[in-house]
Image (tube, rainbow, N blue to C red):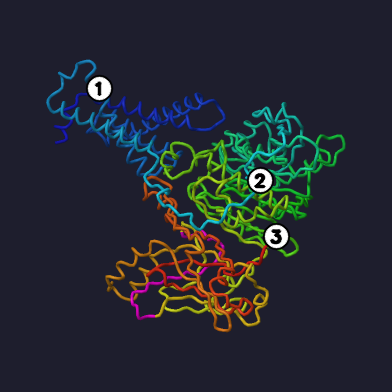
Amino acid sequence: MIKKFYSLFPSAWWKGVAIGTILFVLFLSTLTGYFFNSGLPILVNSLIGLILGGLVLLIAGFILWWLRKLFVKLPISIVITFLSTLITLFCVHSFFGLPNIIFYGGGILLILLTALVFGFLWLLIPAGIASFSKNQKVFFTLTIMTWFLAMGGSILWLMNDGNYDLKEQKITSTLLPKPLDLENPATIGNHQVKHFFYGSGNNKRREEYGKSANLITPSVDASLLLPEWKGFKKKMREWYWGFGVTEFPLNGSVWYPEGDGVFPLVLVVHGNHGMEEYSDPGYAYLGELLASRGFIVVSVDENFVNGTWSGDFGGKEMQTRGWLLLQHLKVWRQWNQTKDHQFFGKVDMDQIALIGHSRGGEAIAIAAAFNDLDFYPDNALLKFDFHFNIRSLISLAPTDRRYTRRLTLSNVNYLTLQGGYDSDESSFFGMRQAERITFGNDKYYFRSGLYMPGANHGQFNSVWKQDGGPPGSWLLNVKPLVAEAEQQQAAKVYISAFLEATIRDKKEYIPLFENWGYGKNWLPEIQYLNRFEDNQFIEVVGYEDDIDLTTTSVHTTISSNQLKVWREVELLYRDGKDKQASNAVILGWKKSDPEKEIPSYTISLPLNMTLDKSLNENDLLVCALSEGNLKELKDEEKKETDKVSEEDKQSDNLNSKMDFTIILHDSLGTSSALRANEVIQLLPRWEIQYLKLKDQNTEQYGDLWEPTLASYQVPLSYFIQKFPDLKLSTLKKIEFRFDRILSGVIILDKIGFRKKRLE
């Protein structure tokens, strides 16, 4: 059989197969070089890729030549060609890191088809198709058709935006609040904006920070913070930049308002990206807006500690990122205090904000923590002398795991923005840092999060745009993504409003952080989720204190009735391993017997609780809430019985919208009930599929869904309006009664009251 197969193809055919295979592999090697950032011109990168691919082919071929006795059944040239091709493919795969099913499955199939096509072409060119036998003609026709179908299908699939659209999950807006009657914070302000660069003058790659810098700044020695600057990485980086770890530059691109005045200072810092594709210009849209509104804005250059082809520091550079920000603040403090300097007396050093993206979002928290220290905590040989008044932190899609320490901050305002389709940082890590911020009562502070399910990681930076580069980015499901302009518009609204509220004390903007609906006239019509907490919050139940489900640290007692699921857990992210650093209660119900009591969850307040006498109808009942996973109910059912009634079968269909009743009881027996979906906009359970292939998505990221809690607040006046006899001064119980839908699961946290905000 094998000999009969070989007889179809003369030696000229095998020669064509070998040439086609080699050409295809060299094309892949050239493509690898094209997308390989080395700082050299693209054509040079491509040529290097071609040469290296050829070398791998030659070396692999030489090795396999010695193994030729194992493959005597085939022409030695084709055996060597195919096996060396596989080795080359393995090398390319190691660089790109594509899924095996895509790279080996699709790649090898296309190589085989291409090889077969070239084999026939090598026969066809000198002799023509007339020289083919009948069987050869059939095989040739099938091969050509299959090749075109496979190649065309692959191209169409890679060019396709995706096969899962988040936009199909609509939410209504009937319960959104009345928009704020304020100026759109994303509107260009009244100040004329000027722009310049400062730098240490020793950057051979970027003239604006080198010899053309408008202001010269000192270099700093980061060797005690980054001992990993060594070996091959050190040599290649110093070759590229022209400086080393002992002379890190302080480079910044500055937008500032023209004219007299004392202006707040805002530093913006990028995260990890290919260091040859400079990240700091990507925040010009923020610099121009905020400067026009009276802020001095600096986009800080830290590209020299970013990843590159010669190696990534893997997060061990995080301390350096934060420390460099504080070194920039020292420069601005000196300029502000130096007579005859152009910024003498023009910088409000008591009003400082830091904005960070990705690893930069974690770096600003490190900077805020280091700011109050006298020594570097990882090496006391490095002394600190900072102590700036950093009032506000804004993290865009931040990391929160690169630095080994989990930092607790106090008395600082915090905002974090996260995209649901962030395939780089796939979870809401900014809220984990938010949980580690404490407030005093001397001044007003708040922390807030904005989750945009259709936003990604890169579009917060106009240089990055995509999450990763090709060919890996070709596998991303980008159909649900909002436009870059929309994502940046939302960022401008929230960042500008946050600075107005926390730096300029314009507290009238704070409702925007409680509920995005207050800014719906300013924001793109996309989906959002808000988290909010301030130092006016009075916690009743937070689930962080003990393992007793029936008690809390403030002496409230908890009871339940007819629940299928009742357990307290530490919430996990989608990978099932990474912790959210927050505990919550999971409640599930399934009512199929009308004779049974209605499922409920009740929190009883102690008689001596101080908040009882201080609550009034201007205050708010608040909680953090998310729809849970219905699988919880199915797991419980399996434990009880395998029998499922018709009503049970229909109950999942009725659970199309999360809903329940909230009831307040006073000690005199009076109660007032509100239907949740009549007073708050309960959000759906969003599923996120990052990759076009669903199975690969689960393997790489974990579940399509993860608990992402939203903050909800109900004015106590609503309860009084429903039943005026309710006495808030003797409030005794908060009850969640699950009587609106037959089955459901919710995740509940941070239940309490919020006093009317201090003006």
Label 3 neighbour load within 10 Å: few <14, some 14-19, many 20+: few
Q: Nearer the viewer, residue 205 or 245?
A: 205
The crowd level at tag 2 (other Cα within 10 Å; few <14, some 14-19, many 20+) is: many
| Residues rendered magenta in the picture | 576-596
Give the Cα separation between the discs numbered 1 and 2: 57 Å
Pick whichever, 20 or 290, lies toward us: 290
Q: Amino acid at mark 1?
A: Leu
Say what secondary structure mark 3 lies in. Answer: strand
In this rendering, the label closer to the viewer, 2 or 3: 3
- Residue 51 percent across, percent down from the top left: 45, 26
Disc 1: CA contacts within 10 A as few (<14), some (14-19) or many (>=20) = many
Which mark, by number, is residue 410? 3
Which numbered marker is on residue 411? none
Q: Amino acid at mark 3?
A: Ser
Above or below 429: residue 17: above
Snapshot quadrant of residue 297: top right
Cα separation, mark 2 vs mark 3, equals 21 Å
Report helix, strand or loop for mark 1: helix
Q: Identify the residue at the far left of this view.
A: 134
| Residue 301, quarter of picture | top right
The residue that label 2 is drawn on is 321
Q: Amino acid at mark 2?
A: Arg
Q: Is residue 595 magenta?
A: yes
Helix, strand, or loop for circle 2? helix
Residue 523 in magenta stretch: no
Q: Earlier in the sequence, mark 2 or mark 3?
A: 2
